[in-house]
Amino acid sequence: MSIYLEMGNKSEEVKLLQKALNEVGGFNLAADGAFGNGTRNALTAYQRQNGFNINGTYQSDEYTEIAELIDHKYIRFDEIGEYAEEIGVEPAMLKAFASVESRGSGFFNNGMCTILFERHIFYNQVVRKLGARKAQEWSNKFPNICYPTRSQSSYFGGVREWDRLESAKDLESECALMSASYGMFQVMGFNYETCGYGNVGEYVADMCDSEKFQLGAVTMFIRNNRGLYNAVRNRDFNEVARLYNGSDYASHGYHTRLRDAYANFSKNS
């Protein structure tokens, strides 16, 4: 199906175009689904840089680089419902997960996978693999990436979380990969087996490849976690948030945000 977009359009297809333009052209568009002046200017710049007719409109048959990137890397929101139905979960519930965990996108503007590195998880992973002495040694030297407790002040935020992950990988790669959450649903690396992977490296590679892999991983994660699966099916938002986000979920309002997002998607389904 050929997709044509121009000034004034408001749709999910515009949002996908904005994401792709950010990645291939180094733009910093807000992926809001509204084709305004910013999107038109970015598209005309892309057209100029790549030898296309400069008209500020998009047609997927012509811009194959963008169209293929979108089809491979990003999902359309209705696809979330298809995966949810395969495991007997309401589509609105899985859409709520995507909305709350990463605002509906599995990648930063530059195309890198959305992540959050957790220094306390890395500390615990190092204890398990290398012992408490090594974990404490690194805690003394590198408290921003290896420390027994969580702190909001340790996060760099956004794409700079990759800097923290890379620093941890320089210390111990497997422990580091286990200690970050990835993609649209922010499932931690140490859950790779529950998500259906043989090792954490394969899991991370897929999370960095496409939102379809991210979606497949979270459906496996929910299906293979009996308590979470039952809580999702029963719409027990407190229990869902506790099992998915940890015991301090209430301080971050995860349960109410999930409930509100579910209500919104249910209303519009």
Image (cartoon, helix red, strand yellow):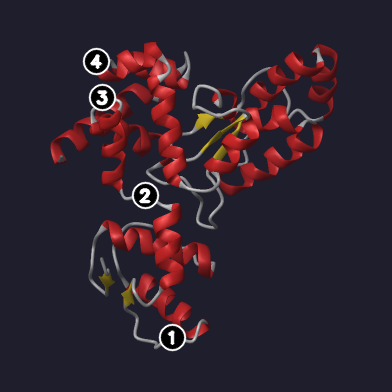
Q: Residues within 10 Å of mark 2 (few under 14, many from 20)?
A: many
Q: Is residue 163 above or below residue 26?
A: above
Instruction: Tell me residue 32's x, y (percent).
Output: 33, 57
N-term mark: 2 or 1: 1
The residue positioned farthest toward the front in the image shown = 198
Q: Is residue 99 above or below residue 130?
A: below
Residue at which label 2 appears: 75
- Tell me whether the residue at label 3 lies in contact with that at label 1, contact meaning CB atoms closer than 8 angstroms: no
- Tell me whether the residue at label 3 lies in contact with that at label 4, contact meaning CB atoms closer than 8 angstroms: no
Query: Residue shown at 42%/46% (left/top)?
Result: 105
Query: Residue shown at 17%/34% (left/top)?
Result: 266
Q: Is residue 41 above or below residue 209?
A: below
Label 2 to label 1: alpha-carbon separation: 26 Å
Instruction: Report the disc number at residue 88.
Output: 3
Q: Amino acid at mark 2?
A: Ile
Label 3 to label 1: alpha-carbon separation: 46 Å
- Tell me whether the residue at label 2 lies in contact with that at label 1, contact meaning CB atoms closer than 8 angstroms: no
